[in-house]
Image (tube, rainbow, N blue to C red):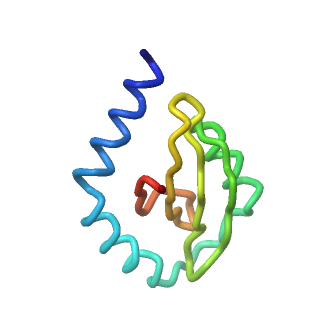
Amino acid sequence: MKRMLSLVIVTMIVGMSGPVLAHSGAQECLRASNEAPISAAAMKKKIDSLGYAVRRLTSGASCYQALMIDRDSGGRVRALFDMANGELVSAELAE
């Protein structure tokens, strides 16, 4: 039950805000940051603490691009994280 609820919540959040996040995410990654980027290892640790298993983490522009698996639901999620502070910029369900 907890697993299904988690997937429903993620689907609703991403579904309602997906187009907005995708558009703003592209713009956010293009802006230059004056802060030193966090390491890929630190980013993986942060994603892990959010309940996701990292399948792939790459860096591009000023964002980390992550392919993650929700440990509760098993759903795949693609996300962009700001390299400067590790904040989520955008996310979408992956097929």
Which x, y percent locates residue 13? 30, 45
Figure disc tally: 0
User: Between 43 and 20, which is closer to the camera in this rendering?
Assistant: 20
Is 31 located above or below residue 13 in the figure?
A: below
- In this rendering, would 81 be left or right of 59? left
Which x, y percent locates residue 27? 37, 80
User: Between 38 and 92, which is closer to the camera in this rendering?
Assistant: 92
- In this rendering, would 92 be left or right of 66? left
- Residue at screen point 67% across, 70% down: 58
- In this rendering, would 15 be left or right of 44? left
Q: Quadrant of the N terminus?
A: top left
- Residue at screen point 42% across, 29% down: 6
User: Between 31 and 24, which is closer to the camera in this rendering?
Assistant: 24
Q: Residue furthest front?
A: 95
Q: Splitting the image into 4 quarters, where does residue 62 fall?
A: bottom right
- Residue at screen point 30% across, 74% down: 23
- Residue at screen point 60% across, 33% down: 71
Q: Splitting the image into 4 quarters, where does residue 19 fall?
A: bottom left
Q: Residue furthest top?
A: 1
Is 5 located above or below residue 25 in the figure?
A: above
Q: Splitting the image into 4 quarters, where does residue 72 fall?
A: top right
Q: Residue furthest right?
A: 41
Which x, y percent locates residue 95? 48, 56
- In this rendering, would 60 be left or right of 26? right
Which x, y percent locates residue 22? 34, 69
